[in-house]
Amino acid sequence: MSLVANTGKLAGRTLFITGASRGIGKAIALKAAKDGANVVVAAKTAEPHPKLPGTIYTTAEEIEALGGKALPCIVDVREEKQIQNAIDEAVKKFNGIDILVNNASAISLTGTAQTDMKRYDLMHNINTRGTFLTSKLCLPLLKNSNHAHILNLSPPLNMNPYWFSIHVAYTMAKYGMSMCVLGMSEEFKPYNIGVNALWPKTAIATAAIEMLTGDTSTSRKPDIVADAAYVMLAQDPKKYTGIFAIDEDVIKKYGISDLTPYACDPSNVNNLLPDFFLDVPGENKDAVTKAESGGQIPELFAAIGKSITPDLIKKTQAVFQFNVKGKEEGVWHLDLKNGDGSCGQGEPKNPPDATLTMDSNNFADMFAGKLKATNAFMMGKLKIKGDLQKAMKLEKMMKSLKNKV
């Protein structure tokens, strides 16, 4: 659902979009295609992925069906030769490149001890190095354009230590992309190249969010990012540069106040999951504090114990430790991995896959479904050590427990 009208401002322009075979990159490509733009679909997926939809070829077909022209290129942004080959092909077919969208990215939401160096290198080589390298190689062509833009899908440089503490390797890799914006926007001013960053206000329904939370009902569609990117890329690059934009802000400034159509589930329009790196001001006003009555947590775990089923164990396959702070301070565990499962006070018998630290004020609300684990995590109310993806499986589990607790 696109709310921003196509104006034709990108007609005949050539966009080089990394990671364009699916998700946000693809959405930006399709939006530009409606203007009659040329799009270099620069991504790794040439063969269909068993779990993820879209290849460079299927995306190219969709671009052309909308009135654009497409050039599918197999590009791993870690490989300089592959990028250069795609650029050379773009010059042959479209006579140049006007716009570079650095969208390709790798993610691993792990703490320092849990981040293996192979994954660290992957994130830094794709996110930071890939963005720098692709920008460097496209620079000679961008200099020749009279409407040159670089747009990085990266966050504002928020120096709140919280965003470093929970996944420092990923934060460094994404901030590397943002530092490219900070430096290149100033460096490329003499060439009239606009260099900006765009980041979503909320979670976006992509394969990454699906993998992380198993649920996109509190996310927005990629269309909001594509619309914001379109508005930004239509600006005069001589005047519009060095900006760290948030999709929602761009759309509202454009004149659209009702963003409900962008929501995957309109009923959750006021309960959308905030994205990483954006501080949420104030407290969660919707969370109801139950700790005042005291003794909520033992009752809660008793109810959880009665709700453990073989199916729940099979689906979850994780051991959780809960370090509860505040009025009902204590350590609790939930084993949904071993034997018939177990829960109760004290540390688990088997090593926890994830350790969650939370104030007792919010703990019962989280298990009653009144405070989402992902929201609590994003706002800093819930600290997680260990396997973040397994910790986020609690979201699904809580839905099954909601009516029983």
Image: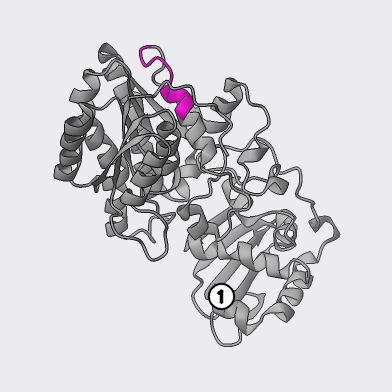
Taking the image as shown, residue 314 lies to the left or right of residue 95, namely right
> Does 175 sit above or below residue 232?
below
**For this view, does 92 lie left or right of residue 210?**
left
The location of residue 48, given as percent across then percent down, is 34, 60
Classify 10 Å Cα crowding around label 1: few (below 14), some (14-19), many (20 and above): few
User: Does the magenta portion include 173?
Assistant: no
**Magenta span has 234?**
yes
Question: For numbered disc 1, what is the local secondary structure?
Answer: helix
User: In the rendered view, would you say 15 is above or below 187?
Assistant: below
State which region is magenta.
230-238
Q: Which residue is mark 1?
A: 315
Which residue occupies 61% across, 25% down? 252
Q: Residue at x 36, y 51 (%)?
A: 58
**Residue 196 visible in image:** yes
Residue at figure coordinates x 50%, y 30% from the top left: 228
| Residue 156 shows in the view | no
Q: In the image, residue 135 lies at what x, y percent?
A: 25, 31
Q: Relative to 20, does residue 397 appear above or below in the rendering?
A: below
Q: Quadrant of residue 113?
A: bottom left
Query: What amino acid is labelled 1 in the image?
Result: Lys
x 55%, y 44%: residue:
221
Instruction: Indicate how the structure is coloured in the image.
Output: one colour
State the quadrant of the C terminus.
bottom right
| Vertical order, 44 against 11 (above or below) | below
- Count of marks overlaid on the render: 1
Q: Nearer the viewer, residue 215 or 312?
A: 215
Asked if residue 104 lies left or right of residue 284, the reply is left
